[in-house]
Image (spheres, rainbow, N blue to C red):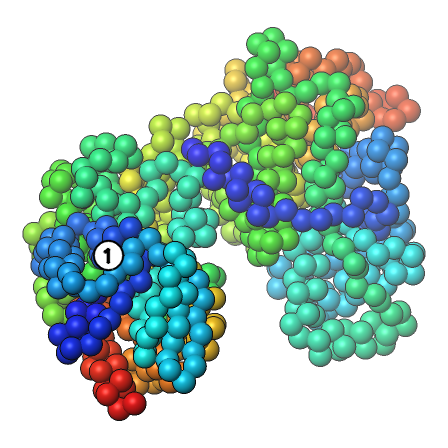
Amino acid sequence: MEAAAQLHRMGLNPVIVEKGEALGGHIAQWDRLFPAFHPAKDVVEAMRDQVKGIKTYLNTEVADIQKDNEGFHAVLSNNETVDAKAVILATGFDVFKAERKQEYGYGIYNNVMTSVELEQFFRTGKDARINQPKRIGFVHCVGARDVKVCNTYCSKVCCTTALKQACEIKEVFPDAEVYTFYMDLRMFGPGYEDLYLKTQKDFDVKCIRGRVCEVSETMDGRLVIKAEDTLFGKPLRMTLDVLVLMCSMEKNKSIDAIQQKLGVANNSDGFMQNRDMYLGMNNTAQDGVFVAGACTAPKSLPDTIGEARSVATQVYNYINKR
Amino acid sequence: MIIEGKQKIWADYQKDIPDDHYFYVRSCIRQAFWPGSEVTFLDITRNKLGKDFYENPYHTTCGGIAYHSDSIPQETAMTIIARQFALMHESGYENYVCSCITSFGCYTETLETWHEYPELEAKIRQYLWDSCKKEFAKPKYLAHASDLIYKFRFDIAKQMKFPLVNVKTGKPLKVVEHIGCHYSKMFPSKGFGGAEYPHVLVGMIEAWGGEVVDYPERRHCCGFGFRQYFVQANRGYSESNTYKKFESMEPYEPDLIITNCPGCPYFLDRWQYVIAEQTGKTYGKNGYGIPALTYEEVAGLVMGYDPWDLGLQMHQVAIEPLLEKMGIPYDPKKKYQGVNGKDLGQPQCPSCIKSV
């Protein structure tokens, strides 16, 4: 949306193809944004406002794409054809499927949920699994920095999201004990470290440095976790009412066929390969094919918006040079 | 509990097992612990199911106990394994099935290591030739014996005489399944059901009418852990593991524990006596313990084998309450008789845990 809006302001005629029923991607499913608890809805609505007047296809996918001397010719799933001088792949990410980490019991034990589902709870106030919980745990790095699932990269936003959600659940259930289990807390952005301090000082969230290795269920449906507190150097066992898995980002695989047609390779983390990570971060090895956002690596919303603006400049220059 | 979640994992971790013609190798400790188990396995597969399971008298230990106790290097264990494979090859078999879980882990680890490091396989070939003048062929298929009973569980169910049901209440027996650590924790794809929710014993329990108990310490080690037990000073670790499991399963009131490892039934059985001696606590009803049986013993029971022919008198925990629940007839007088009816003498029985 941001790249299209920028190109539109530059006098070009962008077209958005969105496979979902509305614009906004994952952020549209989010309640509040870190680090300042800003309503996600405000950001999404502001972005939707700025693409009004831009040709947008919803519930539509690119079925086929060809390139010739004139540019690109995309056949959409509604059988329409879109001709374009350049293509921006801004296909975002898939959320890691938590059931792949079988030891956490997602999809087996009722009260294990994902960060996405918890965000839904914050939006709607409804989730049968969250019933006056007394003790809640968060597991960081689910599907990230994990050789076992072949994702060795850091997913960048999960640490801050976990602390944001830990504060939010304490707002809803002030008497609950909240624990987060982390490997390293990567609070890299402005205001993030402040959030970390706030989480502990104002919300009394306990941050435990160690991974959860096993989850099981008690007779009354509560969860027993085993973990290690690496700062104390001791294993621990704890009974929880709810366990939240901070699922990582993975490459959005629904675009694989079109990506292949365009000749864009994947990088070693399985995301799309850009030309280089410094001066060519929006370029690919293919002339006229650009990338922006979390299709090349896990990124925060400010990162993505920044890349959207830079890719718009790249595309504008590319089209005017032809 | 969402059973569909487990069923999906079980469907993902299935393996194609050859139907017949196996080279069978025994465990080095099971014959002493549970002398009826391996002979029952061979009797069921050969005589009840009509399969070809060959046993070569020259086969030995796999070396796993020494390897996991750090007494021998991996190359030595691999050379022992290579000799076993050579015997299989000389006997004209391609499918290899072992009785022991640790052996299964060692064989799997060896084959995977040779796959990753062919130069090591070449070195072991040379070691085997130098030491035994033998050449080996790798098995086309490697199975654990519990995989076979799992595969044939419905055939066994067809011949079942005493399902895992309480004849007095008509309700399924509550059964704890305990998987040996070396079955699939190292190589999840090599076990039925994977590492976290193995199906190999669950499948047997369900096929034979029982109800599976999933309790918080289900995945925890029985406590054998090799050096936890072999080093005398560490035995408290071994017992505390077992204690942790029994404390966790106690509220579910299980009738029976099924295992697929040589050590697990031994420690889950014997430590119950020690815990009773130390704390006065027993985990079965009315002062009894909870029987911890091998899967072959359970298969034999449901098929109607005589409990004493299965060697169930070798268990510390009394088996009689379970036999009565299942409605299995038994002659108490024959409990301590040898095969020829010879009186073997009655062992001294402890008073802290009931032994009938």
In this rendering, would B315 be left or right of B179? right
Amino acid, disc 1 = Leu
Instruction: Name which quarter of the figure residue B163 lies in.
Output: top right
- Residue A113 at x, y percent in the picture: 32, 44
Name of the residue lying farthest toward the top: B168
| Disc 1 packing (10 Å; few <14; some 14–19; many ≥20) | many
Quickly name the residue at label 1.
Answer: A23
Q: Secondary structure at mark 1?
A: loop
Q: Is residue B353 visible?
A: no
Q: Nearer the viewer, residue A291 or B342?
A: A291
At x 91%, y 24%, the residue is B340
- Residue A242 at x, y percent in the picture: 29, 40
For residue A167, above or below residue A13: above
- Residue A296 at x, y percent in the picture: 34, 72
**Which part of the image, by quadrant, shows the C terminus of chain B?**
top right
- Residue B7 at x, y percent in the picture: 53, 38
Q: Nearer the viewer, residue A143 or A220?
A: A143
In this rendering, would A66 be left or right of A189? right
Name of the residue lying farthest toward the bottom: A321
At x 57%, y 56%, the residue is B186
Q: Nearer the viewer, residue A62 or B217?
A: A62
Q: Nearer the viewer, residue B341 or A36?
A: A36
For residue A248, above or below residue A270: above
